[in-house]
Amino acid sequence: MEGPNVRSEAQRRVGANRRNQAVTTLNHHYPKDRTAYLLVDPYNDFLSEGGKVWPRIKPIAQQNSLLDNLRALDQSVRKAGIPVFFVPHRRWESGDYEGWDHPNPNQRLVIRGRHFARGEWGGEWHPDFVPQNGDTVVAEHWGSSGFANTDLDFRLKQKGITHVIVVGLLANTCIECTARYASELGYHVTLVRDATAAFSPEMMHAAHELNGPTFAHVITSTDQLIASLN
């Protein structure tokens, strides 16, 4: 009968194998005409001082230099000619979710907090991440996936996109769900560890060390991604 040390060693090897499935490389090729940059939920409530959710992600966002990294990536993907897609969460409005049979836990948080309220500052784009001429703003998602019940897949395919780079908020909810859904639809998926944030280090660990390696083709950093794009 196997002892606990044997089982723990086996579990360690499984974890290492999963992490190795997601390749981190400086010279990964991103075809410029088939790659899209998906920026998820860049709202003031998430990214700006005074935002309703900012205090909960601020420690990790600052540790990751999230805003600086998103600025650097925005500049780099535009310079490379990679199309930018804004993937926004549903902006809260009065009457949303009324009569719903079973709103999910994240939707209940939105109901209580009135996050990203339409017509209010918190529901506006962070001033450094505003759609520019030629960008695509897809339909708002009600859940955590930017694909479910939106036009994102349709609009990507109309541009011949096969590779997606997924950044924004939050690492373990909308980023993970959007990226996982993309993988299920057949897209090549890249996650960027320091171009996202979450409420806790444990959530970041789950997103990039446990769950991400099961569906993402590449898990990388901002600097490594920019090197690959250049």
Image (cartoon, rainbow, N blue to C red):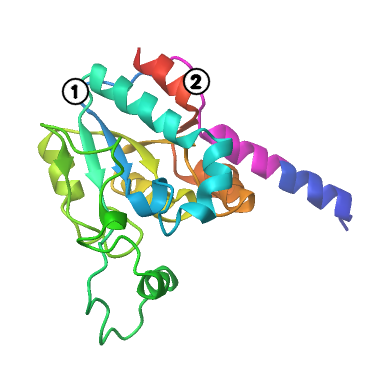
Query: Which residue in the rendered view is the most extreme toward the top?
Result: 230
Give the residue displayed 40% in from the left and 46% down from the top.
47
Give the residue displayed 63% in from the left and 48% down from the top.
201
Residue range corresponding to the magenta coloring: 13-28
Mark 1 residue crowding within 10 angstroms, few (<14) / some (14–19) / many (20+) = some
Q: Is residue 14 magenta?
A: yes
The quarter in which the N terminus is drawn is bottom right
Question: Going by the image, does 64 lie left or right of 4?
Answer: left
Question: Going by the image, does 81 lie left or right of 11?
Answer: left
Q: Position of residue 220 (x, y in %)?
A: 49, 29
Which residue in the protein does label 2 denote?
25
Compared to residue 30, the image places residue 54 above or below, namely below
Label 2 SS: loop
Compared to residue 25, the image places residue 212 above or below, namely below
Q: Position of residue 131 (x, y in %)?
A: 19, 38
Which residue in the protein does label 1 denote?
33
The amino acid at mark 1 is Asp
Label 1 SS: loop
Question: Going by the image, does 197 lie left or right of 85?
Answer: right
Compared to residue 62, the image places residue 114 above or below, namely below
The amino acid at mark 2 is Thr
Residue 147 visible to the viewer: no
Of residues 82 and 210, the one nearer the viewer is 82
Of residues 129 and 138, the one nearer the viewer is 129
The quarter in which the C terminus is drawn is top left
